[in-house]
Amino acid sequence: QSALTQPRSVSGSPGQSVTISCTGTSSDVGGYNYVSWYQQHPGKAPKLMIYDVSKRPSGVPDRFSGSKSGNTASLTISGLQAEDEADYYCCSYAGSYTSYVVFGGGTKLTVL
Amino acid sequence: QITLKESGPTLVKPTQTLTLTCTFSGFSLSTSGVGVGWIRQPPGKALEWLALIYWNDDKRYSPSLKSRLTITKDTSKNQVVLTMTNMDPVDTATYYCAHIRDTAMVNYDPWGQGTLVTVSS
């Protein structure tokens, strides 16, 4: 049971787009279309931003989008805004003999 | 509106058993498809999934912590309880409970505010 691999940090200027990757294996990210993404501001609880790889919950801006290719899922944030600066975590269903959940190591997004 | 709140001790001693309660409102754990999960976050570190329980009493645990965890539900009280045995200083973390929006196991929305548990003698 290993954490999913995310870049430690990414950055972008206001208005630009950034993409955060989340790499797993065929036993988690690559094997199922059950990947979610969470945004966490300092001292706050995480917030669901993307579920089922690419779906947005009600109230999440359409600047946030998700995708998956093979064993890697991605979160893209377009039209960066200052309030997007936060930590982002991916999360995947995992299973072989038994099913469980695994999170990524987290990515710090800095808006320059 | 769905809300969840974690409660329990803020300080436990090494080797003790931690018992955390998640009290929720806005949904029922007797409704098909509904679940509650527990996730923790050591200070300055990443999220770590611990366990979940569904309306039908289906339970799943982190493989690395399975031997130390027990999750139960009390539908009448709208509560989910997580116990973790043999606590160690490395278990110091903020513990969150969260509503699971479907049976995919990975869609947690919303989360409670979290409760910081420190393990120290």
Image: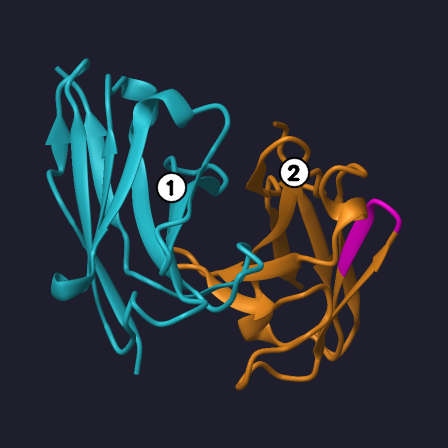
Do badges 2 and 1 share one subunit? no
Render colour scheme? by chain
Q: Left or right of B105: which side holds B73?
A: left
Provide the residue designation for mark 2: A95
Residue A44 appears in view:
no
Which range of residues does the magenta coloring cover? A70-74
Q: Are marks 2 and 1 in contact (CB under 8 Å)?
A: no
Indicate the quadrant containing the C terminus of chain B: top left, top right, bottom left or bottom right: top left
Badge 1: how crowded within 10 Å, few (<14), some, or many (20+)?
Answer: many
Determine if the magenta segment contains residue A71: yes
Kind of residue at badge 1: Arg
Image quadrant where residue A77 sits? bottom right
Q: Left or right of A62: which side holds B25?
A: left
Viewer-side residue, B80 vs A69: B80
Kind of residue at badge 2: Gly
Q: Secondary structure at mark 1?
A: strand
Image quadrant where residue A49 sits? bottom right
Provide the residue designation for mark 1: B40
Q: Where residue A18 appears, x then y in whole percent?
A: 77, 64
Chain identifier, colour orange: A
Question: Furthest residue to the front?
Answer: B56
